[in-house]
Image: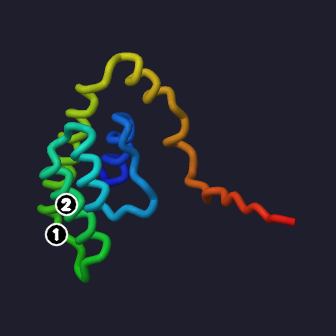
Amino acid sequence: MTWAEVGEALATLGSAPRSWETPIEYAQRAGGTTGVDHRLLNALAGVTTAAGYGPTGVDAEVADRAARAGADVERHIEGELDRTTKLRAALDPRPLLPDRARRLDVRTTT
């Protein structure tokens, strides 16, 4: 379970990550709007930040604990979803598509 997968699961509850948010900012916002334990999300965000930006990353034990905690978050979220939402999420092809650059809406005045 990666931080991106936690973000996808949180998005099913209506709290998708914003491109400009740090993991900590996203964890604080999502924890306040989804009912998922904000302390757990903050801890996962901290591990994600340390793994991505720390000089040595994180050791295997910390990574394993974070993966288990992320799986717990996903199970909690799946328990909150109704059957229709679960079916939509299962059939949604967007997670399988590669990321694409966001379009810019540039308007000129004449």
| Type of amino acid under label 2 | Ala
Nearer-the-camera pick, 13 or 88:
13
Which quadrant would residue 32 be assigned to in this image?
top left
Residue extending furthest front? 110
- Determine which residue is flagged by label 2: 63
Query: Which element type, helix, strand or loop, lies under badge 1?
Result: loop
Contact between marks 2 and 1 (CB within 8 A): the answer is yes
Residue extending furthest right? 110
Which residue appears at 49% of the width and 42% of the height? 95
Give the class, few, some or many, for how many residues have Cα within 10 Å of label 2's Cα (few <14, many ≥20): some
Which residue appears at 27% of the width and 68% of the height? 49
Which residue appears at 60% of the width and 55% of the height? 100
Which numbered disc covers residue 28? Answer: none
Which numbered disc covers residue 59? Answer: 1
Nearer-the-camera pick, 105 or 59:
105
Residue 68, position as x, y percentages in the image: 17, 47
Nearer-the-camera pick, 37 or 2:
37
Which residue appears at 31% of the width and 53% of the height? 2
